[in-house]
Image (cartoon, rainbow, N blue to C red):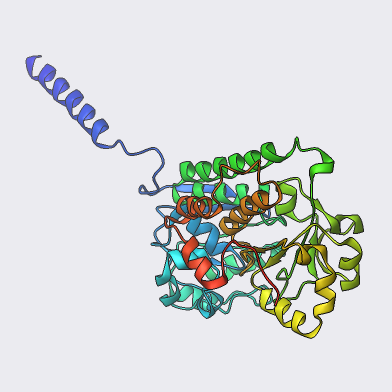
Amino acid sequence: MRKSMIALLLSVMLMALGGCGSQTAPDKASDPKKITVTDMVGRQVAITGPVERVVAIGPGALRLYCYINGADKVVGVEQMEKDNPTGRPYLLAHPFLTELPVIGPGGPNNAPDPEKILAVKPDVIFSCYTSDKTAVDELQTRTGIPVVALDYGTAAAFDPHVDKSLKVIGQIVGQGKRAQELIAYFERCQQDLDNRTKGIADEKRPRVYIGALGARGTHGIESTQGKYALFAAVNAVNVVDETGKTGSFMIDKEKLLEWNPDKIFIDLAGYPMVKEDYSKNPKFYNVLSAVQQGELYSQLPFNYYWTNIDTAVADAYYIGQVIYPEQFKDIDPEKKADEIYQLLLGKPLYAQMAKDFGGFKKLTLP
């Protein structure tokens, strides 16, 4: 009887010790387990963790992954990521990415390369090639590797599709808390921008225009957007919205003379084209009130292999300050940009972006 009691006590002690030794942090992907997620095209995808090797393909997929989990587990990148890292903060923060093996050409008009992806042996493939569910299934079948479709939506910033994509990535790599942190931060920024500007009387809102926006390449002043997300974020009066159009399109330059906005923003990627056009036709520009009054302002380009959300949000704060200086008098746009880059990518990157493009400032012509 005594021996059996001793044995029972020893067994209980071992179970207790075993229970203590097995405890892990609640949000880590270090233990092998099967995770099932619903991706952004509605597919149920099962992944067996821990996920230690990752590739991200298609416009913007690598960026979203870097926001959640840094870059240490990335084992290959598309050629599009190597060709020109300028203007892509996630590559500035993680320059070694451009030295990794090539897993395909990349780009919105190119299909993934299953053989090159297989060569780097990833545990999961994050994909922003989401327009064709059948193609995503086919890639998973051909590689035998779970393929998780992500999506940016259509807005330059504050699109709910991004929030959902971040959650999916967080689930898979054990960074759910990180995903929630970023989503909450974006929500705070969106609410902050709206709260600062929604109560302004209509007669105190300058009429504004954004030109030289990138859209499958760089363009001059006639390239713009209707319902422009960054203007909408600060409740700006976008003169283009009277057309009823949404998204990117080219205006007739004479229409800009008709609108004659109070303030004009120029995307810095297209600024050289605007200056070149000015040299050919200065009379057109010099008629504009914004040019006459020195109300021409920059915007950091954010559209490189889809949207650099960090830069877009930083732009929204600068735009807000330009349009409504009193409501944004406590904001230093450069410091705000670095706050955003630091949170999303772990490094203050505004100085490098300003060096590459020119930074937040008034512009002059020529």
Coordinates of residue 74 in the picture (x, y in percent): 43, 65
Residue furthest out toward the front: 293
Q: Quadrant of residue 51?
A: bottom left
Q: Nearer the viewer, residue 101 or 11?
A: 101
Residue furthest out toward the bottom: 280
Q: Nearer the viewer, residue 172 or 358?
A: 358
Left or right relative to 39: residue 123 = left
Coordinates of residue 14 in the picture (x, y in percent): 18, 29
Question: Residue 75, can we see it?
Answer: no
Q: Residue at (75%, 83%) from the top-left corner?
A: 279
Coordinates of residue 298 in the picture (x, y in percent): 65, 64
Coordinates of residue 160 in the picture (x, y in percent): 67, 47
Q: Residue at (58%, 65%) from the top-left corner?
A: 140
Residue furthest out toward the left: 2
Instruction: Classify 328 as above or below 342.
Output: above
Q: Residue at (54%, 57%) from the top-left corner?
A: 64
Quarter of the picture holding the C terminus: bottom right
Quarter of the picture holding the N terminus: top left
Q: Quadrant of residue 120?
A: bottom left
Instruction: Classify 116 as above or below 9.
Output: below
